[in-house]
Amino acid sequence: MTMRVGSGHDTHRLAEGRPLILGGAIIPHAKGLVGHSDADAVLHAVTDALLGAAALGDIGDAYPDTDPKWKGADSRLFLTETIAKLNQLGWKPVNVDVTIFAEEPKLGPVKSAIKSSLAHLLGVPADCVNVKAKTGEKVGHIGRGEAIGCHAVVLIERDVGS
């Protein structure tokens, strides 16, 4: 087996009148993330990490915000299309570890929903997905509640014969 590690990061600002979607799960909150797509910072970071692990560039290369095709897109599409690209090359996800940076809402009660969603989307067992939440301790754009960010690390594997 050949294995590779990838790292991804994304940050989006918060605004009224948008749904908050993290890891494909809808999170109850008065504000949501703003972006060209649905702005799911978790799925963007995971997609970026998968692309990086397979040496396929980054999410901006694969799904540019200058392309009207992706306007308002469901970020689950980015992830499923990326996994399909990896599968064509003989790669598959093994595990993922994500850290979500948010002052509000408190994510402890919804981490399991995010974890379940990620496991389903990645096609891995739930015990291969870890979700952590950190606040900004009132510092910077995250600490002031202006944005939510996410950092993801993934492991992918490929059979040497593939």
Image (cartoon, grey):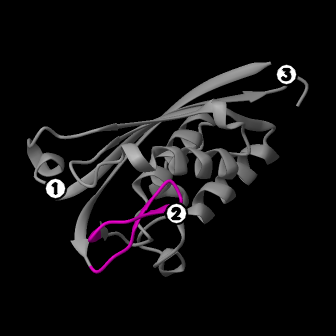
Q: Amino acid at mark 3?
A: Val
Q: Nearer the viewer, mark 2 or mark 1?
A: 1
SS state under label 3: loop
Q: Amino acid at mark 2?
A: Tyr
Quadrant position of the C terminus in the picture: top right
Q: Quadrant of residue 35?
A: bottom left
Q: Quadrant of residue 14?
A: bottom left
Residue 160 circle label:
3
Q: Is residue 47 left or right of residue 83?
A: left
Query: What's the distance in space between the residues labelled 3 and 2, CA to CA?
Result: 29 Å
Query: What's the distance in space between the residues labelled 2 and 1, CA to CA?
Result: 27 Å
User: In the rendered image, which residue does mark 1 sit on?
Assistant: 145
Which residue sits furthest right? 161
Q: Which residues are magenta?
A: 17-31
Which residue sits furthest top? 1
Q: Nearer the viewer, mark 3 or mark 1?
A: 1
User: In the rendered image, which residue does mark 2 sit on?
Assistant: 63
Q: Is residue 159 left or right of residue 145?
A: right
Residue drawn 67% across the image and 57% down it: 80
In the image, 120 versus 112, the foreground residue is: 112
Ranked by sequence position, the earlier of labels 3 and 1 is 1
